[in-house]
Image: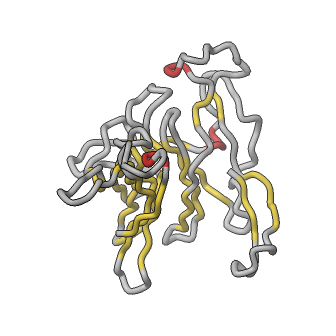
Amino acid sequence: IGLMENNDPANNNGWVDKGYVITNASDKGLNFNIKPNDWANCYYKWNAIDPSYIITPEGEHWLVYGSWHSGIAALKLNGETGKPAETLGQPWATGQAPAEYGQLIATRQTGNRWQASEGPEIIYRNGYYYLFLAYDALDVPYNTRVVRSKSITGPYVGIDGKDVTAGADALPIVTHPYKFSKGYGWVGIAHCAIFDNGKDNWFYVSQGRMPKDVPGINASNAIMMGHLR
C-alpha cells in the first residue's frame, strides 16, 4: 500500500510519491517452500491490499487493510506523515507476524490462511466503529457484511452478537445478488465506500456486475460498474 500527496486534488499532475506505507507481513520466516496450492499454509499473514483510512474522535490515525489471507488488520499511523506509527522492521518473522504491521480485527475463521474476505471500509458514528467487509468470490456471490465495535481495535461483533474478531461469521448481509422480472439483475455487489453528504444522509457506493452471459455483451460478468445506494 503506497501513499501519494497533493495540495490541490484538482491538479492531476501534482501528485508526489511518498513511498510505501505497508507491505505484506509473514509469520513464517523466509520459508518460500510452501506449495502453490497450499492455501491453508500460505506464506503471508497480513495481505497489504484494500486500505481504509480513519481518524478517531481522539485524533488518532488508523489504516485498516486486507485480506484474502488471515484476516483484516488495523495499523496505527503517524498523523503527520501517514506512515506507520512504529518503525517497521523486516516484514517476516517466525511464529508471529511482526506486531508493527498491525493487529487482527476481523477474520472469517481463526487460523484459516486463505479466506474470502477483503475490502474493509470503516466509519465512526454515534459511539461505534462500523466495519464493512466484502465477502466471497468477485464474480457472482460477492456481498457486503457489516459489524461494529466501540473500539477501533475491536472486538467487532455482528448483529447476532458474535465476535468477528475471534472468527465468527459477519452479519448482517448488506448487499447480495438480486434480479427483478424485467431485468438481468445485478451480482458482485461489494467492496464499498461509505460516506455522508454533510447532512447525516449516508450513502453506499460499490462495484456491481451483470450476471454471466447477458446477450450482446462480451464477458458481461467481468465488467465492474459503479453503484450508489
Horizontally, residue 176 falls left or right of residue 99, namely left
- Judging depth in this view, the residue of 146 and 98 nearest the camera is 146
The answer to whether any part of residue 42 appears in the image is yes
List the single residue furthest toward the front.
216
- Give the vertical position of 30 relative to 110 (above or below): above
Location of the C terminus (image quadrant): bottom left
- Give the vertical position of 199 relative to 176 (above or below): below
Residue 215 location in percent, x, y?
37, 49
Residue 207 location in percent, x, y?
45, 57
Horizontally, residue 10 falls left or right of residue 205, namely right
The answer to whether any part of residue 152 appears in the image is no
Could you tell me which residue is drawn at 41 percent across and 29 percent down? 110
List the single residue furthest toward the left.
181
Residue 177 location in percent, x, y?
29, 50
Hey, which quadrant is residue 150 in on the image?
Answer: bottom left
Hey, which quadrant is residue 46 in on the image?
Answer: top right
Tell me, what colour scheme is on the image? secondary structure
List the single residue furthest toward the bottom.
199
Could you tell me which residue is drawn at 41 percent across and 64 percent down? 227
Hey, which quadrant is residue 228 in on the image?
Answer: bottom left
Could you tell me which residue is drawn at 69 percent across and 55 percent down? 85
Horizontally, residue 89 falls left or right of residue 130, namely right
Could you tell me which residue is drawn at 72 percent across and 59 percent down? 3
